[in-house]
Structure formats: structure tokens, C-alpha cells
Image (spheres, helix red, strand yellow):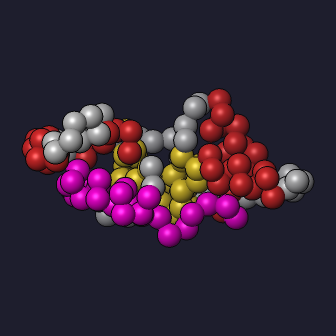
Amino acid sequence: MKKREPVSTIMTKNVVAVQLDDTLLNANKLILKHHIRHLPVVHGTQLVGMLSKTDINRLTFSGLFAGEGDVDEAVFDMLNIGQVMSHKPRAVKESDTIKEVAEILSKEEFHALPVVADNDESKLVGIVTTTDVIKYMLEQY
């Protein structure tokens, strides 16, 4: 097993992210379209938060009742991304090892972490998930 493998080797580099001033409706559409569970939130190029599918699901009723899509849109119109996202997300650097990332994911109970540039901790360069780490571990066997 490679012991010092950087997270940059397993992270998703073409990150689907949402701008802070975007709408919750659009964020939800991105999550559904790309079959993802976590959206980094950026202001320009600066990482400012994380929005998860769970965060959005907590706001909606469509999963509970048939035909409640209009209610969901009304809720999305009442709130903005900044009110729903996790602020100041825990991030890792692209040179951090996969082992270090796995320890953070397991101890701090995150399911995804934004990856920032080594030379600019506000610049989003990727995202790594528990699934990425598990796939990497499976490849080692």
C-alpha cells in the first residue's frame, strides 16, 4: 500500500460547485442532474461553504407527499444558499495524504471534504468523498 499518496490522486478535479448568490432551486437541480450529494459553495473562486443533499432534503416535502413540488419551490424561494449551507467548511489541501483525509472523514464524521490549493487555502481545486477513499482502499487489495 502506498503510504504517502496525496489526496489529489483520488479527488474529483472537475468539481460541480454553486455560487453563493445562486438559488437553492438551482443547487437542487445540480445535485439531481449530476447525481451528487455535496456541493461546495464559492464566492467567485473562494470556498465559503458546503451544501449537501441532506441540507436541501430537510427543507423539502416532495419526498414525503406526492405532488408537493410547488411547496418545495416556495421554500427554496424563501431561503438562500447562505442560510442553509455549512459555513467555513473543513477542507484539506491537495498534498494532504489519503491516510490523513481518511482519518478526518472517520473521526469528524464528514462524508465529503473540499480540497483546496496548497498555495491558496481559499481556492477550491477538488472534492474528496468517503466513496473515493473506499475505492482507493479496495484497489490496494
The residue segment tinted magenta is 9-35
Image coordinates of residue 33 in percent, x first then y, are 36, 63
* Image quadrant in which you'd find residue 4: bottom right
Is 65 on the left or on the right of 13, as rendered?
Answer: left
Nearest the eye: 121 or 8: 8
Whether residue 25 is visible: yes
Is 48 on the left or on the right of 117, as rendered?
Answer: left
Q: Is residue 48 magenta?
A: no
Image coordinates of residue 118 in percent, x first then y, are 60, 59
Is 140 on the left or on the right of 17, as rendered?
Answer: right
Q: At 45% from the left edge and 49% from the top edge, which residue is drawn?
A: 37
Residue lying at the far front of the rendered structure: 66
Q: At 71% from the left edge and 55% from the top edge, which residue is drawn?
A: 135
Whether residue 47 is visible: no
Is 43 on the left or on the right of 121, as rendered?
Answer: left
* Image quadrant in which you'd find residue 105: top right
Q: At 44% from the left edge and 58% from the top edge, which residue is drawn?
A: 35
Q: Is residue 25 magenta?
A: yes
Question: From what the image shows, is residue 12 above or below residue 50?
Answer: below
Image coordinates of residue 133 in percent, x first then y, are 69, 50
